[in-house]
Amino acid sequence: MTLLRLMQPAFTAGELSPQLYARVDTSKYQSGLKTAKNIFVHPHGGASNRSGLEFIGRTRGSGFAVLLPFVFDAETDQTYNLELSHLKMRVYRAGVAVLETSKAITAISIASPAVLTAAGHGYTDGEEIFVSGISGPTALNGRNFVIRNVTTNTFRLEDLNGVAVSTLGMPAYSGSGSARRVYEIASPYTADELRRLVFAQENDVMYLTHQAHPPMKLSRLSDANWTFEVLTFAPKMAKPTGVTGTVYFKRKSGQVANIAYRVSALNAAGNESVPAAAVTVAVQYENEDGRRVRLTWNAVPNAAIYRIYRSDANTGILAETAKNEIEIDQTQYIADGSPIRTVAEPGAPATPTGVAGTIVYGKEMKYIVAAISDDTGEESLPSDPVTLRNDMTYRGNRNVLFWTATPGAGAYVVYRLDNGRYGYVGRTELTTFTDENITPDLASGPQEGNNPFNSAGNYPACVNFYEQRLAMAGTQNVPAGLWLGQSANYENFGAASPIKASDAITIRLRSKEKNQIRAISEARGMAVFTSANEFNVSGGSEDFLTPTNTVVKKQSNRGSSWLQPIAVGDVMLFALARGGVIRDYSYEFANDNFTGRDLTIMSRHLFEGRKVLSWAYAQSPYSIVWVVLDNGMCVNVTTPNLLDTADKPRSKAE
């Protein structure tokens, strides 16, 4: 029998589905494999045995955990793996669990179970320690143990399987040795929540989101010092305090008269009471200089309007008001001659009481002050308002503000209320500011704080960065909601009035059905992956997002799973919500939209009916994406395939 040998020059198609065994007409058939087990395919077409995995330790309590990468600086080896288990977090660096400072061991009993002595160790029952440097029972060295029966100075050892450790038959302890606790901190996340935990890192800080918890910030202070804190979404710059002011004005001389004022009350039908007894105020009425007569009285039940009379030499009505106070210009002293009522009309309200009159200067002017961070340029929330009275239409009149210096502030901005809105009047590097009738710029207003994630139901599902903004999306109450913080001020989701280009942005994706945002990423705009569609969010012709420039375009109707997309070069991979399918997400110039290919179509048998649980991308040396499925199988996808970029090879490892 003649033996026919065929040469297969490459394996770039990976393991082919049995449904393709008869498809000799396809190019993939010529470079495919029936079984590709425990190998990986090189980008140039060859194949190699995959390497094994190194065991570096057990998870806490040998329970379920996830690993999150934390890369601060790969060049100086400041890279970590964060092990999150049920309500706890541990830290690994260079493949080794981070340990706390050592506690000297001073005695070890030769017994079953063995008891170790370490004065004032500070450990708690159930914690894990690493033992080293012991002389005598050296079999204990280089091992991790769980400690039990903890007292102030002693504890006994259990191995990681829960078996008490015996030192019977070992040499007696002869000195030295230390115990180091495995560093761990409390975490807010339960084991059931870890699969939905989404993170985004920036330098020493990692932001984490889950719909069951308020957004958290994880900070690295050192290898063995990490902290979780709930985000407050307020400016880091504290607002100024102690704002006060001094009014400077000039008074003019002129004729002064003692003017008597009386106030009556009228109901909605116009029935008038007898006016109250007169109150007399000395008024300089000849030369206007901003002085005003302020009258106040107690509110009267059923009064719709109050009438102010002059009741001395020149009698009659001066003014009317619906409030129980009024300010009258100093030159408004001539009455209309109307008679003053001496008997109340039937059904009239009661006569006003508590009428008082004073001279005030000018009008009320309200100011607020905000601090500007010297490091970041971030503007604080405004101070509590301070009210001054002046009339700065007169030359030389001015208001001088003072406040307490704010730590970290490089400058301050001052706003003044005008027609119900605060407008910008000036900036200073001092803790004082002089207003000489500066016209407020109402196009530039102060910051207004905003925390869109302040209660259960409003916690976001996913997080990422986009155009120097912190982006969060997908709450239970607003599944299609997307929020971006201020530019370069990640944790500030506030805005000014009127809005500024750098202010926080709020977007809601509209669709026919409930559409839960599950992931956000960056790809020629912001890529938003939802349960039913894929969207691209951009600033349109402005090229960058602002609160007033947002363009949302639907790209496809695939639907994404909760697994976060992974960036591979200039494309992204995402797992579909249904069917165990992985697709790429890349821009197609011809159609001016993002499209993609099914990367699992040639190896459907590996993915059909399965769920992609986790994945990671190893860029060097072979550009491989390692994919973990819910049946425990690990599948690798090599990309890019230099011989045929139309598809990606796959192999499986068990």
Image: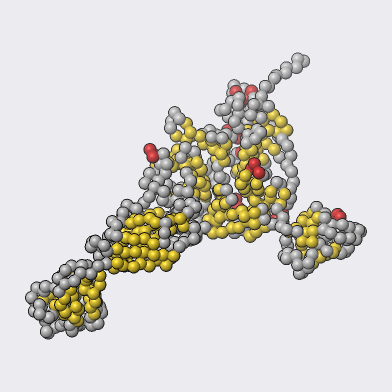
Residue 300 position, x and y percent, is 23, 79
Q: Is residue 452 visible in the rendered structure shown here? A: no
Q: How many marks?
A: 0
**Where is residue 366, by image quadrant?**
bottom left
Measured along the vertical axis of the image, is residue 421 above or below residue 203? below
Left or right: residue 404 versus residue 20 is left
Which residue shows up at 43% across the image and 32% down it? 592
| Rendering coords of residue 484 (x, y %) | 45, 49
> What is the quadrant of the N terminus in the image?
top right
Q: Image quadrant of residue 622?
A: top right
The residue depicted at 52 percent of the width and 50 percent of the height is 462
Give me the residue at 55% from left, 48% from top.
202
- The residue sitting at 73% across, 17% down in the picture is 4
- The image shows residue 46, relative to residue 443, as above or below, that is above
Q: In screen coordinates, is 136 left or right of 22?
A: right
Quadrant for the C terminus, please: top right
Residue 395 in the image: state x and y as whole percent.
24, 61
Q: Is residue 308 above or below residue 238?
A: below
Give residue 166's position: percent from left, percent from top.
86, 60
Q: Is residue 588 visible?
A: yes
